[in-house]
Every structure is written in C-alpha cells, then in structure tokens.
Image (cartoon, rainbow, N blue to C red):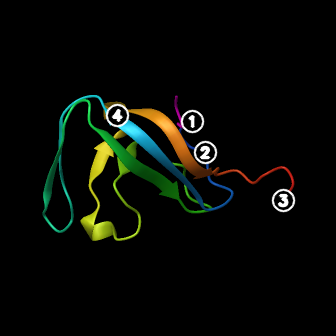
Amino acid sequence: MTVRKKTGDVAAQDWFVRARVCVRAEHHAHSLERELRIFRAGEVVEMVQWGRAGQEIDTASWWTTNQYIPAAHIVPADKVEVLELLDERRPEPDAED
C-alpha cells in the first residue's frame, strides 16, 4: 500500500494521513529535543504524514506526531510498510467541495 504522490504535486488543501506502519529496517532517529528513538525491524507503529495547502506534497517520511514537533521522531518512507490507513484527508479537494 502506498500513499506517495508524484514529485511536484501541490496540495489543494491541508492534508494528513495517519497509519499503522511496520518498520522494515532498523532506524535511529533523534527528535529536536535530542531524544534518541531506535525503531526496530518488524516493529509496528502508528505514524503520520501531513502538509499544508499550497505546498508541495511531501511523503518521503513518516512522523511519530504532528502535535508537538520538537518531540517527533522521523522515519524515511522507504523504511516502513503501510499496514493500515487509520484516517486521512487527501491533499486534493473532494469532488463535492
């Protein structure tokens, strides 16, 4: 399952994806608060991607949170497999809007 958009696409509205992902390969991530988090291969984690209207859609990484950025840990998208989409708002507007 993939949520990638082609490079250069611009979001028509604020968007987000919340998913359960499985870590494919060990990854060491430091938050802005300098806390180390080691993601282990096979670990299942709830993570998010998001962006703002008018900005390029970037799905190159998954974040542990978008609520308090200094505490967030980031994992490159190529190191995770999306298992289940939990919630999303697509970057393009719905047809009814």
Proximity of marks 2 and 1: CB atoms separated by less than 8 Å = yes
The residue under label 1 is which amino acid type? Lys
Q: Is 37 placed above or below 85 here? A: below
Q: Nearer the viewer, mark 3 or mark 2?
A: 3
Instruction: Find the magenta span and give its range.
Output: 1-6
The residue under label 2 is which amino acid type? Asp
Which mark is drawn over residue 6? 1
State the residue position of label 2: 9
Q: Which residue is rendered at x = 26% and y = 36% of the image?
A: 43
Q: Nearer the viewer, mark 1 or mark 4?
A: 4
Q: In this rendering, would 64 be left or right of 87? A: left
The residue under label 3 is which amino acid type? Asp
State the residue position of label 4: 22
Which mark is drawn over residue 31? none
Q: Give the structural element (helix, strand or loop) at label 1.
A: loop
Which mark is drawn over residue 97? 3
Rounded to the nearest whole Å, what is the CA distance between mark 2 and mark 1? 6 Å
Proximity of marks 2 and 4: CB atoms separated by less than 8 Å = no
